[in-house]
Image (cartoon, helix red, strand yellow):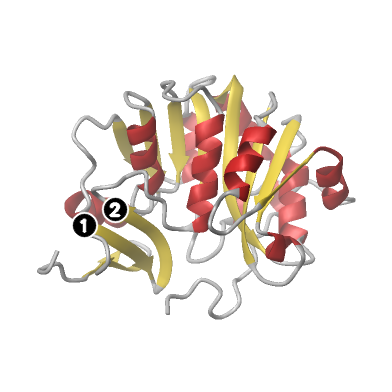
Amino acid sequence: MKDAIPVTRTIDHGTAKLMPDIDRERAWLLTVDGAPQSYVDLDAPTHLEFEYARRLGYVLDVVAEPGQVLDVLHLGGGALTLPRYVAATRPRSRQDVVEVDRGLLELVAEHLPLPEGARVALHASDARKWLENAATDSADVIVADVFGGSRVPAHLTSVAYVREAARVLRGSGAYLANLPDAAPFDFLRSQLATLATVFEELVLIAEPGVLRGRRFGNAVLVAGREPVDIAALARLTAADAFPARVEHGAALRDFIGDAKAVRDEDAVPSPEPPDGAFGIG
């Protein structure tokens, strides 16, 4: 990829840049307003560079039998890293991607095209608005990875939003979310309490250092009406180059503590990351 050069474009919500990875042929990093958003290797769609993306990938691996076809709804598009992963690991799966920034979708479609035969439909829309109009029992998995800048928008954090997600999911379906926070975890705990209003099974995946309050970081939440394979998930996350802990059951209830579910009128975005938390060196 000797002739690959960075691509910079003004999109609907900021400035996007695609930067080639000099160490991997046909691999690109997407940033928006300087914050890393996605990493894609066009020749190796199962390569997940970001730690949180690998953890979401592990969950996608264990929510159903290997290779089983799924209907997946992605809220938040980025460079379509996880849709590419699902297309590679679960061929013929039907996927919808909802991204509010049409300009970003167009940039990614132009420079990082999806593989031939990928059954991925792209929709330029607000995630909650699209969810409210989606058919009941139409998705096996919902992956929520939506950021306005570096923060999860407030209207995607409430009980009303979670109820819509639960309506769209099939009975055995799983809701996955990438959420950033730091100790004392007011946002993360409130999100778990909010999910608990409609889902019986909850799982939290995060680095030990984040859970111990040492730094700001991403946590992956899994919610559903049926339990996920905790043992398999724990094995996968523990074997990662950056191991993570899988919390569930009594330990997770203790973590949630007295946190209250979020109503629309009280909803706030996720906390602002400290300077340099997700920067690129």
Q: Which residue is mark 2?
A: 41
Using the rendered image of the protein, determine whether residue 47 is visible from the camera's viewpoint. Answer: yes
Tell me the residue at 20%/46% (across/down): 113
Amino acid type, callout 1: Arg
Q: Disc 1 versus disc 2: distance between alpha carbons?
A: 6 Å
Tell me the residue at 19%/55% (across/down): 111
Compared with 127, 153 (above or below) is below
Earlier sequence position, callout 1 versus callout 2: 1
Decide if residue 270 is on the left or right side of residue 184. Answer: left
Q: Quadrant of the C terminus?
A: bottom left
Q: Quadrant of the N terminus?
A: bottom left
> Could you say which is closer to the camera, residue 235 or residue 131?
235
> Could you say which is closer to the camera, residue 14 or residue 6?
6
The label shown at residue 81 is none
Disc 2 element: strand
- Is label 1 in contact with label 2 (beta carbons under 8 Å)? yes
Q: Which residue is mark 1?
A: 26
Decide if residue 109 is on the left or right side of residue 197. Answer: left
Compared with 153, 234 (above or below) is above
Position in image of residue 136 (x %, y %): 53, 21
Position in image of residue 133 (x %, y %): 48, 30
Disc 1 element: loop
Decide if residue 60 is on the left or right side of residue 227. Answer: left
Amino acid type, callout 2: Asp
Instruction: Report the number of numbered marks.
Output: 2
